[in-house]
């Protein structure tokens, strides 16, 4: 039985010592080199801190050094908090105030450490020595925390999602059970390490004796160079957030260079426009495409859908079926939703559930609740806040509970309006917001479609009460740092105009 994720690392280091484990633009480390580095650093860190099962922040810059820092913390018997010091100072200070780490590990010089104040910092140079040959990580249990990753809260207060070894081990085991990545798979890491999409790259690579190839952010501004790097490093598997796939399609990258060695493209984070998927499928017909769904609170993903070749360009892509060892179902309040087409809240049970929100017991109690369908004994359930519906046993995403509005006496899913808009000719992506004060729907969209043509397309598919009062073409959307459309900013634009107009 695997109790600690380092068991994956150690096993791969013993089996494939000369294979590349972690790689970025400037650094490539074999499994032997990486294991030797994290074990030495971990022992010294354990001696310097004298703690176990405590938080240690690791300053990240999206390099190999970040990963060495994470695993050194785990080796020391503690858990890590990815900390991006380029974030606004107030947010960094809040994260530190919530977690109160034993120290901040600076694997590389940080651009600024002002947000750290007087907190203890440690560097690899300060952690050199010859401590006793101990392995503090082996004395832990699988429900101990592995990491705390922060997500944005609806109030603006960051929430620290606390994830155990058990949940990450379960994720790796079930992904491998479903997708059967071959030994030595090369994962092209796009997501920053404080974004849970990256968790799949890291731990699936360790499980398969594969490689994490870190693709730096600036490559995504030059997709041709990005594809050349993918080819050069023989990357065969991409587990990317949807915006990264959209960039490649919008710039028609495959007309100039195609990564013919790709075998798998898994995507998640938001709804992928069908036309973007069609672009990738048309140019890379031999690739397996998979739609993944799941929030950070259930350790990355709880459902998957392997997309059939030649999917209809206007059809919504299902989020599919549950991974083994977790149960995904719909509830309306506490009542089960089982009829085709009936919308309910997506709820999840299983080992995938996070332990809760770090030092936020009230918030944890709101989201991680007893499963009302299980009366004989207590079972934890996570309410995602996402809506879905079943169609012939397959699950489809239907937007957020907090984007379900009441307008003109009707309950409306803003996501349904967006799906119709995204299927229209000349629309790359759209986002709909509701101005409750002015009682109007406003649809922002990116693409070549004229407003008149888009309005006609929407009238042909939507009832009158769901038609936006205004359509706005934009050259680019405001984005969150995780690459999603910033809907709060769009709403602020709309409501700000009312107040100042």
Image (cartoon, rainbow, N blue to C red):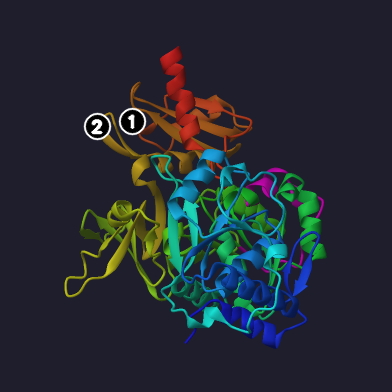
Q: Disc count in the image?
A: 2
Region in magenta: 245-265
Return the x and y of residue 496 as percentages of the image width and height. Answer: 45, 20
Which numbered disc, 1 or 2, marks the residue closer to the eye?
2
Quadrant of the drawing holding the C terminus: top left
Instruction: Tell me the element at label 2.
Output: loop
Marks 1 and 2 sit apart, C-alpha to C-alpha, by 9 Å
Return the x and y of residue 84 as percentages of the image width and height. Answer: 60, 50
Binning the other alpha carbons within 10 Å of mark 2 as few (below 14), some (14 to 19) or many (20 upward) gives few
Return the x and y of residue 295 as percentages of the image width and height. Answer: 44, 57
**Could one spot residue 267 in this view of the protein?**
no
Q: Which residue is mark 2?
A: 409
Q: Is residue 242 magenta?
A: no
Instruction: Tell me the element at label 1.
Output: helix
Going from the N terminus, do you reach mark 1 or mark 2 first?
2
Nearer the observer, 263 or 226 = 226
Return the x and y of residue 75 as percentages of the image width and height. Answer: 58, 75
| Residue that appears at 58% across and 51% down | 242
């Amino acid at each position: 039985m695997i109790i600690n994720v380092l068991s994956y690392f150690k096993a791969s280091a013993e089996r494939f010592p000369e294979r590349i484990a972690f790689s970025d633009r400037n650094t490539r480390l074999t499994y032997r080199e990486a294991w030797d580095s994290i074990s030495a650093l971990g022992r010294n860190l354990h001696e310097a801190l004298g703690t176990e099962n405590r938080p240690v922040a690791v300053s990240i810059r999206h390099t190999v050094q970040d990963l060495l820092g994470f695993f050194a913390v785990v080796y020391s018997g503690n858990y890590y908090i990815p900390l991006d010091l380029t974030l606004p100072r107030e947010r960094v200070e809040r994260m530190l105030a919530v977690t109160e780490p034993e120290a901040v590990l600076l694997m590389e010089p940080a651009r600024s450490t002002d947000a750290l104040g007087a907190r203890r910092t440690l560097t690899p140079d300060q952690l050199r020595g010859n401590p006793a040959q101990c392995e503090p990580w082996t004395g832990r249990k699988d429900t101990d925390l592995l990491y705390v990753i922060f997500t944005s809260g609806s109030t603006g207060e960051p929430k620290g999602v606390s994830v155990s070894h058990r949940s990450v081990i379960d994720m790796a085991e079930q992904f491998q059970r479903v997708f059967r990545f071959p030994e030595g798979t090369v994962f092209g890491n796009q997501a920053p390490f404080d974004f849970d999409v990256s968790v799949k790259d890291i731990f699936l690579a360790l499980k398969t004796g594969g490689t994490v190839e870190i693709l730096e952010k600036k490559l995504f501004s030059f997709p041709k160079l990005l594809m050349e790097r993918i080819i050069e490093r023989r990357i065969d598997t991409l587990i990317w957030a949807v915006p990264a796939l959209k960039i490649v399609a919008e710039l028609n990258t495959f007309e100039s260079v195609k990564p013919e060695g790709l075998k798998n493209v898994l995507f998640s984070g938001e709804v992928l426009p069908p036309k973007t998927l069609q672009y990738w499928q048309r140019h890379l017909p031999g690739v397996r495409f998979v739609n993944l769904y799941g929030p950070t609170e259930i350790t990355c993903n709880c459902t998957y859908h392997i997309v059939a070749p030649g999917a209809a360009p206007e059809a919504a892509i299902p989020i599919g079926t549950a991974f083994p060892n977790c149960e995904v179902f719909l509830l309306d309040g506490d009542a089960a939703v089982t009829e085709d087409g009936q919308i309910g809240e997506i709820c999840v049970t299983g080992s995938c559930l996070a332990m809760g929100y770090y030092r936020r017991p009230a918030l944890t109690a709101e989201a991680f609740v007893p499963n009302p369908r299980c009366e004989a004994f207590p079972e934890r359930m996570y309410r995602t806040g996402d809506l879905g519906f079943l169609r012939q046993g397959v699950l489809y995403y239907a937007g957020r509970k907090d984007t379900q509005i009441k307008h003109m006496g009707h309950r409306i899913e803003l996501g349904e309006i967006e799906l119709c808009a995204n299927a229209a000719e000349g629309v790359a992506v759209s986002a709909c917001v509701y101005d409750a004060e002015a009682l109007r729907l406003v649809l922002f969209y990116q693409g070549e479609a004229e407003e008149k043509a888009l309005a006609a397309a929407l009238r042909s598919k939507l009832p009158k009460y769901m038609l936006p009062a205004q359509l706005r073409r934009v050259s680019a959307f405001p984005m969150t740092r995780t690459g999603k459309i910033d809907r709060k900013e769009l709403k602020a634009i709309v409501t700000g105009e009312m107040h100042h107009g």
